[in-house]
Image (cartoon, rainbow, N blue to C red):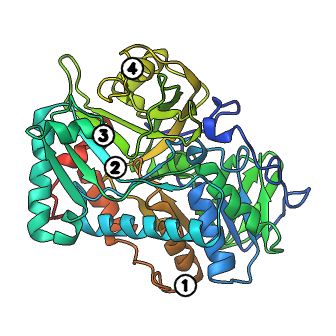
């Protein structure tokens, strides 16, 4: 923006031109590959959405299908469609029920239910599997005790949320063994969890919009700058290598890259690089019925906790398929991944960790040895300074909306967040058709911005998801 000059700490740049190869992007949709609805970039649009991942796709769907607005919507994507975080994540959708604000937990549960119904009703081929639950296996006692205290408090204040959880103590080794986590210090089972092929979900949404004459998708069109239009008061000028586009309304569905175009958000949404591997399990392949989170207090000599996650791909035959999509190891990464906005390289230390530290804690029935990986990749998340997503019009930049900063929880919150921001852009009520209202904690206000800046910077506290377990369960 014109009023934001000079680079800032943790400010993102453009997405990498040659990113690592993601498991989820290995079967690109032929309709979307290199897609440009028009050969030339439009010079004007009613609404421009920057980003084509889960947020951008569901915002466009809400604008043009749910709300049936008669407006020209242009979507700009720096790389191929859904080539950012959504196409590079862990293939896991699990609401965070404890250790967060109850209103946010309820919203994530509603978003999960919305996605589950959508996949069923529209018969979306995205390998959605509703699991028996998500196992949070704690590899250290203090962090487990903190989590249990959270749930005890939640039982008194919000019993419905607490009913979604089951605490398994170390004194129940047979149950831990059945969960394939016999060596953990205790576990918490969240009843709501799913695995999916995220790119295929978004490809379905985008391809269903392509026939709409009001929708114009322009891939491989990075946005170089966003500023007030010098010739059209009240509008914004979007400069790309292919030309300039003018619009009165812009949605930044850019998550970890938001500060590239909105530098004033550099300290509010910080890019964080994560790394994931598709691990080949030992033979015979064991079928997992849960997803997993492995959490632990910092080890000696480290100041960041363990926070790794895993889902299993479907079996293709009795002894093929079933790759373990395993992400984490960020405590070993350069600067804990904070401020890293490039996804064109692997960190070898993290890659070795992911291939050699899965069993244990997970009992896969084989030897504890380094396992091969068919794919290894990185992706850029957007971490929020106050842990909550930022959704709404930016107070200091009229006509610019943000829907980003999910802190690793985009899958169970982005779809309905995008629906809410689309309603805002059209001046409509944010709820309706049975969907939950956007949590107050997500809304962008000057007061929230100032309050967030009074708190610790992400780099001072590690920006860690595990820190959720130390917050008040009742949101007070």
**Could you tell me if the residues under marks 2 and 1 are in contact, i.e. CB atoms within 8 Å?**
no
From this view, report whether residue 299 is shown above or below residue 214: above
Checking the image for residue 134, the label placed there is 2
| Residue at (32% x, 28% y) in the render | 363
User: What residue does disc 3 label?
Assistant: 464
Name the front one of labels 4 and 1. Answer: 4
Residue 143, image quadrant: top left
- Residue 75: % across, % down: 72, 61
Name the front one of labels 4 and 2. Answer: 4
User: What residue does disc 1 label?
Assistant: 427
Residue 56, image quadrant: bottom right
- Residue 280: % across, % down: 53, 25
From this view, report whether residue 230 is shown above or below residue 296: below
| Residue at (80% x, 45% y) in the render | 241
In the structure shown, which secondary structural element does the residue marked by tag 2 occupy?
strand
Name the front one of labels 1 and 3. Answer: 3
Front residue of this view, candidates 18 and 230:
18
| Residue at (19% x, 63% y) in the render | 162
User: What residue does disc 4 label?
Assistant: 366
**Could you tell me if the residues under marks 1 and 3 are in contact, i.e. CB atoms within 8 Å?**
no
Density class for disc 4 (Cα within 10 Å; few <14, some 14-19, many ≥20) is some
């Amino acid at each position: 923006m014109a009023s934001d000059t000079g680079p800032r700490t943790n400010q993102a740049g453009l997405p990498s031109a040659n990113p690592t190869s993601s498991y989820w992007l290995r079967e690109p949709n032929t309709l979307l590959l290199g897609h440009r609805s028009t050969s030339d970039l439009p010079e004007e649009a009613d609404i421009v959405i920057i980003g084509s991942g889960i947020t951008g796709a569901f915002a466009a769907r809400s604008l043009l299908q749910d709300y049936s607005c008669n407006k020209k919507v242009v979507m700009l994507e720096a790389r191929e469609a859904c080539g950012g975080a959504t196409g590079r994540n862990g293939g896991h959708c699990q609401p965070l029920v404890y250790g967060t604000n109850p209103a946010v937990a309820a919203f994530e549960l509603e978003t999960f239910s919305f996605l589950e119904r959508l996949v069923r009703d529209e018969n979306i081929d995205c390998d959605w599997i509703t699991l028996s639950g998500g196992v949070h296996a704690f590899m250290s006692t203090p962090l487990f005790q903190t989590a249990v205290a959270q749930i005890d408090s939640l039982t008194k204040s919000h019993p419905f949320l607490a009913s979604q959880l089951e605490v398994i103590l170390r004194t129940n080794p047979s149950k831990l063994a059945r969960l394939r986590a016999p060596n953990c210090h205790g576990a918490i089972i969240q009843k709501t969890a799913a695995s999916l092929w995220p790119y295929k979900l978004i490809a379905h949404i985008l391809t269903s919009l392509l026939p709409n004459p009001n929708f114009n998708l322009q891939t491989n069109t990075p946005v170089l700058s966003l500023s007030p239009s010098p010739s059209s008061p009240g509008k914004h000028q979007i400069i790309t290598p292919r030309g300039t586009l003018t619009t009165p309304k812009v949605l930044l569905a850019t998550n970890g890259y938001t500060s590239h175009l909105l530098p004033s958000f550099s300290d509010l949404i910080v890019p964080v690089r994560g790394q994931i591997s598709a691990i080949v399990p030992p033979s015979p392949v064991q079928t997992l019925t849960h997803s997993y989170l492995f959490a632990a207090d910092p080890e000696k000599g480290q100041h960041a906790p363990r926070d790794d996650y895993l889902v299993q791909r479907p079996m293709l035959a009795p002894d093929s398929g079933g790759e373990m999509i395993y992400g984490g190891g960020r405590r070993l990464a350069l600067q804990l991944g904070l401020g890293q906005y490039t996804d064109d390289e692997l960190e070898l230390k993290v890659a070795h960790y992911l291939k050699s530290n899965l069993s244990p804690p997970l009992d896969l029935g084989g030897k504890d040895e380094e396992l091969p990986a068919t794919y290894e990749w990185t992706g850029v998340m957007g971490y929020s300074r106050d842990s909550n997503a930022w959704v709404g019009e930016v107070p200091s930049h009229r006509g610019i909306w943000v829907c980003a900063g999910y802190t690793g929880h985009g899958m169970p919150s982005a779809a309905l967040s995008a629906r809410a921001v689309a309603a805002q852009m059209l001046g409509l009520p944010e709820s309706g058709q049975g969907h939950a209202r956007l949590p107050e904690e997500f809304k962008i206000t000057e007061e929230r911005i100032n309050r967030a800046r009074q708190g610790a910077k992400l780099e001072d506290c590690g920006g860690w998801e595990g820190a959720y377990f130390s917050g008040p369960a009742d949101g007070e």
